[in-house]
Amino acid sequence: AALMILYGAHSFLHKTEFPVTRLKKGLQKSGIQVGRIDRIMEPYKHSVIKGGSGVGGRYSLNNQGTTQVEGLLKKIFS
């Protein structure tokens, strides 16, 4: 879900980086309760770029992450 939020932020909001605080709020609105974003993003570290630290942190998808999310979306909607 976090990768898809990052993809949506890039595709529809034209934001290349997305703040940790907004990512956490987006996950909560999706019904996913998260303590720390960095812990849930750890398995996907090959798909994201992390900038900053703590509350000022930001995430963005790299090319591999974008391809991964596009593949997931094709599976879901086809």
Image (cartoon, helix red, strand yellow):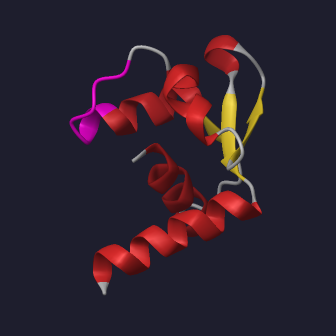
Quarter of image, res 34: top left
Residue at 68%, 32% in the rendered image: 58
Q: Is residue 58 left or right of residue 75?
A: right
Tell me: residue 75, above or below residue 23. below
Q: Could you tell me which residue is drawn at 53 percent across and 21 percent down?
A: 39
Q: Is residue 56 above or below residue 25?
A: above
Above or below: residue 63 compared with residue 48: below
State the image coordinates of residue 53 (x, y, percent, origin top left): 73, 16
- Left or right: 69 in relation to 47: left
User: Which stretch did the figure color magenta?
Assistant: 28-34
Tell me, yes or no, whether the highlighted magenta stretch contains residue 31. Answer: yes
Q: Position of residue 64 (x, y in %)?
A: 71, 62
Residue 29: x %, y % from top left: 26, 37
**Can you say which quadrant of the picture contains the C terminus?**
bottom left
44 w.r.t. 16: above or below: above
Q: Quadrant of residue 16?
A: bottom right
Rendered residue at 78%/23% (across/down)? 52
| Furthest residue toward left | 31
Q: Is 18 covered by the magenta stretch? A: no
Q: Main secondary structure of the magenta part?
A: loop
Residue closest to the eye, 70 or 28: 70
Q: How many circles with numbers are drawn on the protein?
A: 0
